[in-house]
Amino acid sequence: MADLAARLGRQGFRRAGRVHNRVALPLLVKEFGLSPAEKGIVSAAPLAGIMVGAIALGGLADIYGRRYMFVVEMVVFVLFLIGLTWSPTYLWMVVFLFGVGLALGCDYPTAHLVISESIASKDRGRLVLSAFAFQAIGALVGTVMGFAILSNFPEIGAWRWMYATAIVPAIVVVMGRVRISDSGHWLMTQGRKAEAEAEVARLLEREPPYPKQVRLTDLPADEQAAMARVRRNGGWRELFVLPARRATILASVPWFLQDLGTYGIGIFTPTILVKAIGHEDIVPHNVSALIACDILAAKGAALLDVLLIVGILAAVLLSDRVGRIRLQIVGFIGCAAGLGLATLSLHTAEPMRTVLLFAGFMLFNFMTNVGPNAQTYLLAGEVFPTEIRGKGAGFAAAFAKVGAVLTAFLFPVLLADIGVNLLLGVLIASSLLGAWVTWQFRIETMGVSLEEIGR
């Protein structure tokens, strides 16, 4: 259980950090006197770091090993988090936020591989998504911590305490990760059979001892030759030629489309609701009003985070029963239906207007978490061969975060220029396109061993 806890630990930090950004942002803007452009840079810095970290660092797990990068990324996370807590200026804050994002980006593929390559195929989806669910739990914990800190320290500098609360738990997770077993899958691709057998035996250690000895079968000669070729050329080319190209499209494009909708709706739901219902934003004119508004925002965020947990729990229960592809397609269609209800509300009189609007957003939040939000992450770490699995999952995560960064910059502009109605129509189309791409390039991984999927 300690081994599993070390493997899961960072998932909660990932989402808790995002929530701290959301709750802390008004305080950051006030303390450093940020302009709208600087506020946008602060919001985009961790997303840009995730994008760079996923593609630049995630693939290193194929070179240096799963456990090594699993520990290194957490150390990097702790160092940048400490720096962020003590940021003296706006520029240093952006640097540290980007650095935190780098570590988070590396974690996207690495955390998945550490778990998925160490468990039985029949339970792989359930356990990987159980780890993924810690993001939703981290979101709720982060929101509660933000609310508690603001309530007890109602001052501008409270954002520093929000980030500081994660430092000690993160150090504990580093210590736990040092002790986990390494991936036997990866060690075999490196020709290190004896080490692979030792790590698998360590993973299976129990009382009474069973099995007493672990003996792994040598890889076929053609697979050894293919892995040697990948090691020589670095592996990136393999992602874009057959047969792995199909997996690259399935892992990357739906995740990109999912992030367009999820980040757009998640970041700007309050703005959309204000514009749709017809009320104006309340602008705080002093520090006390700012703190009060931020506490209110934290309470609202907590309610939404509870809905996230419900959706992720449904994904955990269904992924190894219904299948990844079916859930992803149904989830995308459900997202489109939810956004359709929200669009319909714009042309409906009260009281049905508010009912349809909130029902639409609730349906969207649930369907995206039971479907594409969970399943894109799960599939990205399963559909590639072991020797390029880190690079493939890292590329998919980075490609997806392009959608998140575009959303962060373009969504406010589009909301102002084309209006809520047309913007929701674009997001409906992107959700339906995600369902089509998933079906067109489908690779079902439920209950299939990673070796068989990769070949």
Image (cartoon, helix red, strand yellow):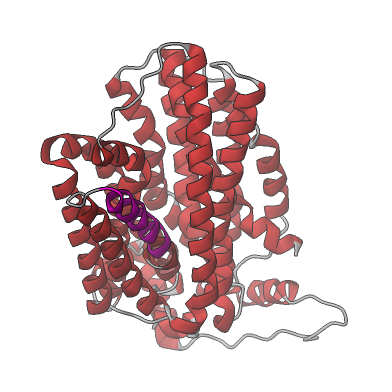
Q: Taking 38 as reference, is 145 left or right?
A: right
* Residue at x-position 37% and y-position 69%: 230
In-front residue for pair 436/427: 427
Residue at image x 44%, y 87%?
221
Q: Is residue 335 above or below residue 297?
A: below
Figure quadrant of the C terminus? bottom left
250 w.r.t. 100: above or below: below
Does residue 25 appear to the left or right of 128 in the view shown?
Answer: left
Q: Residue at x 26, y 59 (%)?
A: 341
25 falls in the magenta region: no
Magenta stretch: includes residue 359? yes
**Total labels drawn:** 0
Residue 377, x across and y down, in percent: 43, 63
Quadrant the N terminus occupies: bottom right
Q: Residue at x 39, y 12 (%)?
A: 33
Nearest the viewer among 430 and 182 is 430
Residue range of the region highlighted in magenta in the rendering? 350-367
Quarter location, residue 195: bottom right
Does 381 sit above or below residue 308? below
What main secondary structure does the magenta stretch of the protein show? helix
List x then y, in percent, for residue 36.
29, 22
> Is residue 68 rendered to the left or right of residue 223?
right
Work out whether residue 340 or residue 435 is closer to the camera in this orientation and state it.
Answer: 340
Q: Is residue 362 visible?
A: yes
Residue 164 image-quadrant placement = top right
